[in-house]
Amino acid sequence: MNQITPPPRIEIIPESAPFSDAQRSWLNGFFAGLLSTDAPTPLPAEQGSALVSGASGDGDDGEAPWHDQTMPIADRMKLAEGRPMRRRMMAAMAQQDCGQCGYNCNDYSDAIASRSEARLNLCVPGGKETARMLKTLHEELDKAPTAAPGDSAAAAAPAVIGEPGRSRDHPVAATFLSRRLLNGAGSEKETWHIEFDLSGCGLDYVVGDSFGIFASNEIGHVDQIIALLGASHTTNINGKTLREVLTGDVSLSPAPDKLFELISFITGGAQREKARALAQGEDPDGDAATLDVMAALQKFSGVRPHPEAFVEALEPLQPRLYSISSSHNATPGRLSLTVDCVRYVIGKRKRLGMASTFLAERINPGDEVKVYVQKAHGFALPQDPKTPIIMIGPGTGIAPFRAFLLDRRATGATGRNWLFFGHQRSATDFFYSDELNAMKTAGLLTRLSLAWSRDGDKKFYVQDRMREVGRELWTWLAEGANVYVCGDAKRMAKDVERALVDIVAQFGARSIEEAVSFVAELKKTGRFQQDVY
């Protein structure tokens, strides 16, 4: 492999700029990364280093340079050093503002720091990494003197009881209608179009919103765990059977630190030391990342916690959020999702995505499911129906854009629509192909740009297609188009943003720094919006 020499360090942000040393260092690294041909540098998320909530009474300036989904937690915590506790807690979050916790990242951290929220494990995208950091910070918070009344970090926000179906804490029952496989024969993927009936619960939504689903664990998996415990499935746990609790109340993946703590209490010797190490986030055998609850019990075979203590050591089962792929204006009372079914093998054991397989095979038409609508923050169609839109959504990222197109057709919006869609193979993975081609024929879908990563000798992605049609894409931007991205935050969204910066620089006759500023301004004004996970 040819060695690539990195460019010299570039000081783009002057010392006189209104940034701290840490922020200036990060921004210089970011701009330098854009100029590098080496490994890609994370690009800023929606807010980047923009103000999140303004300066407040605790002396914080309100800036959040860590608010970037692609940034490792260690880097985020470094940027938050010296900030008030609530801001350090925010840096521990997953930075997705997905609403799955019932808050956005900023408000969740404020609620924990003000002691109005005791749950430290609600950040589903952040997983163990976030929960461990929050636990550490919370212990530090407990040692600190109680702040005076009225202090912004201690003032608890009043509890808000939302209307039914509008939050994870107040779900309603919707009826499952149907599922339809979207992949053709021979596909390596398993993706389902899922339909719900909302007429009975009275829920509505707007395109861009997400749908929260309270799924349950697979009964066979539950019974295997009960067998490993050497317990009876009818064991009483606070008025429910052990099987009922393990099916609907607790998470069986991944194994939480508390479970390893419990195991360390009831075993000894090398087993105890190993369990203690895992409880502290260490990885003595190199398999910590693969240990769900069942694998943890198998790893410490012969250790049989008491069922009540075992359940107490597990995390609550969290709802899952999915982008809505339908329009209430087009089909009132009905809602659809586009869901990848997760199945994989570790060792000799098949692992299942809990919620995706619940939707793909464990519920039947007519079954009721607890659900809620999560309102989108900063991801919506433009207010002016004449505004052109560019939508970039490979794989299941197409979900909200199908919704956008259906909504624009239903409301008679006249703005032009350009969709970038990609997946592995055109023959088996072109989701909603009949619909999209019909929309193109009818003129609703002005342009449809496709990218198939496995159809040729070289992998080809949506960002590659963007570069191919960069001149036309720049023209749309110059004419006021909004840009939307949906999909994977770690790689795809970052690569798409980098491609957009390159296109602005090349066809907008701008330097890289000016192109970055242009894209940042698109974000600031709401013309570049992301739904990433």
Image: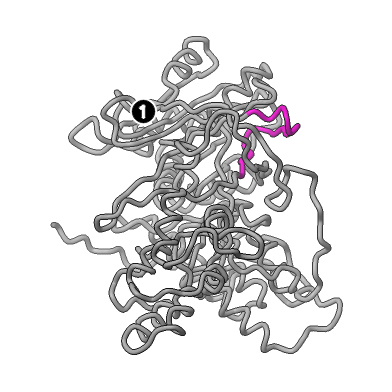
| Res 479 seen here | no
In the displayed structure image, the side of residue 533 where residue 480 appears, left or right: right
User: Which amino acid type corresponds to the residue marked 1 in the rendered image?
Assistant: Asn
Please, what is the dominant secondary structure of the magenta stretch? loop
- Which residue is the site of mark 1? 183
How dense is the environment of label 1, judged by Cα within 10 Å: few (below 14), some, or many (20 and up)? many
Q: Is 78 covered by the magenta stretch?
A: no
Instruction: Name the spot of residue 446 as percent of width and height, x first.
Output: 50, 18
Residue at the far top: name it: 442
- Residue under the point 63% across and 24% down: 407
Residue 493 visible in rendering: yes
- Residue 285 or residue 489, whichever sits in front: 285
**Foreground residue among 509 and 406:** 406
State the colouring used for the structure image. one colour
- Quick check: 443 above or below 497? above
What residue is at 69 percent from the left and 67 percent from the top?
62
Magenta range is 197-212
147 sits left or right of 91 in the view:
right
Q: Under tag 1, what secondary structure? A: loop
- For image coordinates 80% across by 65% down, the residue present is 157
Residue 29 lies in quadrant: bottom left
Q: Is residue 481 above or below residue 254?
A: above
Q: Is residue 204 magenta?
A: yes
Farthest residue to the right: give it.
Answer: 149
Near-viewer residue (1 or 335)? 335
Q: Position of residue 255 (x, y in %)?
A: 44, 66
The N terminus lies in quadrant: bottom left
Q: Is residue 49 above or below residue 514?
A: below
Image spot of residue 301 (x, y percent): 33, 72
Where is residue 419? Give x, y as percent: 47, 27
